[in-house]
Amino acid sequence: IRQKLMEYLAIIIITFISGVVGTGIGGVIGAVLRRDSNKIVSLLLSFAAGIMLAVVCFDLMSEPIEMMKAGELPNYTPLIVAAAVAGGYAVVWLLNFVIDKRTNHEVKHIDEAHPATADSLDELIHADHYQAHKKSNNKLFVAGIVMLSAIALHNLPEGMVIGASYSMVENLTSSLFSGSGFIMAVVIGLHNIPEGMAVSVPLISGGMGKIKAVLLTALSGLPTVLGALLGFALGGINSIMLVVSLGFASGAMLYVVFGELLPEAILMWKSKLPALAVFVGVICGFLLVMF
């Protein structure tokens, strides 16, 4: 029991740093600068998306296949992986679709001519929806809940990927700073910085104090910790649940990569450089996984 508690504590600490501290750093930068650079953010998101894609495809989704070849899992394991990936993708897509459907029509600039996906971090986390209702206290509270829900939907699957990755490790305490789990924690922490900027800037622009805005921004990273605990707990039940956990987390992450990060990065900077950043990210992710 003591060993298990230590493992859960290690997961909490590493994902707290990745989710809360990473987002909080972005909040501080946003509070100081009160603006962000679309080009830098675009490249950062693209690079992070490339590494996430590499880790998911070369490690998380391939691990169950290796276990099957070793005789630890049944021959139909690829079907379980495919179903779990599809399920993770579909659940996150559906929840995002519901939020977008209920809120986009309340933001004036989102009309028929607007891209079908978010073209800024403000839209991705629905900070624009929050800004649209800042003059109405009743609607402002609901808009704040929507914004936090959108952030949670973005951070929860990221945390699940970290937790599910660590659930594959036999001795977690000695391997906390190595392997795909640590790689994902670092990458997610990196891409949480511009996300934190996107949260704090509209809060401060709306009249909130800088310290309070930064604290709220940092707390918005807590779903990463919850997702990691969920992924780690499910993956530790048995081999089949490990496959399901890895697959679901991978599918959810693939939606974040292909449905959010990449379209947004390309729309933020209409250039070939975001695609190059993705390519570099995939290569770096592949090397990190292999070594």
Image: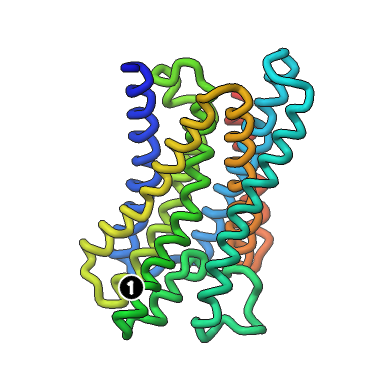
Q: Quadrant of the C terminus?
A: top right
Kind of residue at badge 1: Phe
Instruction: Indicate left or right for 104 with 177 as reference.
Output: right
Instruction: Say which quadrant the N terminus sits in.
Output: top left
Give the residue at x 68% y 60%.
Answer: 272
Helix, strand or loop under label 1: helix
Q: Residue furthest top?
A: 71
Residue 193 is situated, as x and y percent measured from the top left of the image, at 41, 53
| Residue position marked by numbered label 1 in the rendering | 141
Residue 279 point in image, percent of width and height: 67, 46
Image mark count = 1
Q: How is this picture coloured? A: rainbow
Q: Position of residue 8 (x, y in %)?
A: 37, 28
Question: Is residue 215 left or right of 270 when viewed as pictured?
Answer: left
Residue 227 vs residue 27, the one in the foreground: 227
Up the image or down, 286 lies above or below 138; here it is above
Q: Foreground residue, 181 or 140?
A: 140
Q: Is residue 88 left or right of residue 170?
A: right
The answer to whether residue 51 of the structure is visible from this angle is: no
x 50%, y 25%: residue: 236
x 65%, y 75%: residue = 115
Left or right position of 216 against 221: left
Q: Residue 114 occupies which quadrant of the picture?
A: bottom right
Q: Is residue 189 above or below residue 131?
A: above
Does residue 91 show up? yes
Query: In front here: 142 or 12?
Result: 142
In the figure, residue 77 lies in which quadrant?
top right
In this rendering, the answer to whether 189 lies above or below 94 is: above
Q: Residues within 10 Å of mark 1 (few under 14, many from 20)?
A: some
